[in-house]
Amino acid sequence: MKNKKPTKSSCILTFVISLVMFAAGVFLFVNDYPYVVFGKTVNLNEVIEKGEPYPEHSYVTYTPYMPIGAYATITDKIEGIIPIGKAEVHAIITEDNKLISAQIKSKKTISAMENAAEAVYEGTGYNPVTLTGYLGSNDYKIGGYLEEMYNEFGLQDMGVEPTRFSIDTSKTRLQCFIIELFGVGMGILCFVFGIKQWKGLKEAAVPKAEQ
């Protein structure tokens, strides 16, 4: 099978792809570097205590006020594409009486959250669990499962307000760095490949110019 000869349009497309991937990697790093490099997060407990808006699209640290158990299991994916295992989604009632979620992959943390939820139902004390991750939102499907739990537990009668907020604890500093490095690296590789394509195009055009 013969290799396809590069064309001007294919070279331009390669350069555009390289630019997009490189820019995406740099943008993510610039946006995430306080967390990736220094491990800085927003203390969600303090935010709630002060009555401030939830810092969506930020990395947070949160010690759940009232864990009430898992309500879904999902396939955890990097950027919604690359599967990296299963994760449980747990429901939490916050200090300001809102219902939020936490996506958890660590078996140790899952066990601690289950023990905490059991202690809540039994009315006994439990060891605090600290969650660190990206504060985003549930997708439509997971949100539907949470609504079912909300109705089943009669949380509306308790004055609990349902929300789509979800702490994704699978987004660790290392994972974020790998994703960003991958974007920058692939951008550079695509650019180098584009240069080779362009040189090949120029070389192919030389004989025609000489005729």
Image (cartoon, grey):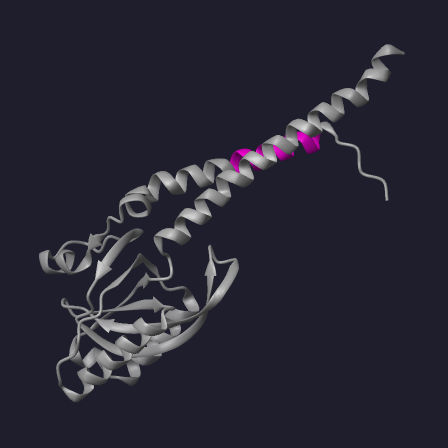
Decide whether residue 52 is among the magenta residues: no
Q: Position of residue 24 (x, y in %)?
A: 46, 40
| Residue occupying the point 32% across, 73% down | 108
Q: Residue 124 or 93: which is nearer the viewer?
A: 124
Count of all numbered marks drawn on residues in the image: 0
For the C terminus, the image quarter is top right
Q: Position of residue 29 (x, y in %)?
A: 38, 41
- Whether 61 is drawn above or below 25: the answer is below
User: Which SS type dominates the magenta stretch?
Assistant: helix
- Extreme residue toward the top, this view: 210
Q: Position of residue 114 (x, y in %)?
A: 28, 80
| Image quadrant in which you'd find residue 142 | bottom left
Left or right relative to 93: residue 21: right
| Residue occupying the point 75% across, 26% down | 200
Left or right relative to 5: residue 126: left
| Image quadrant in which you'd find residue 45 | bottom left
Decide whether residue 10 is among the magenta residues: yes
- Extreme residue toward the right, this view: 211
**Stretch of the chain drawn in magenta:** 9-20
For the N terminus, the image quarter is top right
Q: Residue 7 or 25: which is nearer the viewer?
A: 25
| Residue occupying the point 50% across, 42% down | 183
- Extreme residue toward the left, this view: 50
| Residue occupying the point 80% across, 19% down | 205
- Whether 33 is drawn above or below 167: the answer is above
Q: Residue 59 or 159: which is nearer the viewer?
A: 59
Q: Position of residue 171 (x, y in %)?
A: 37, 57
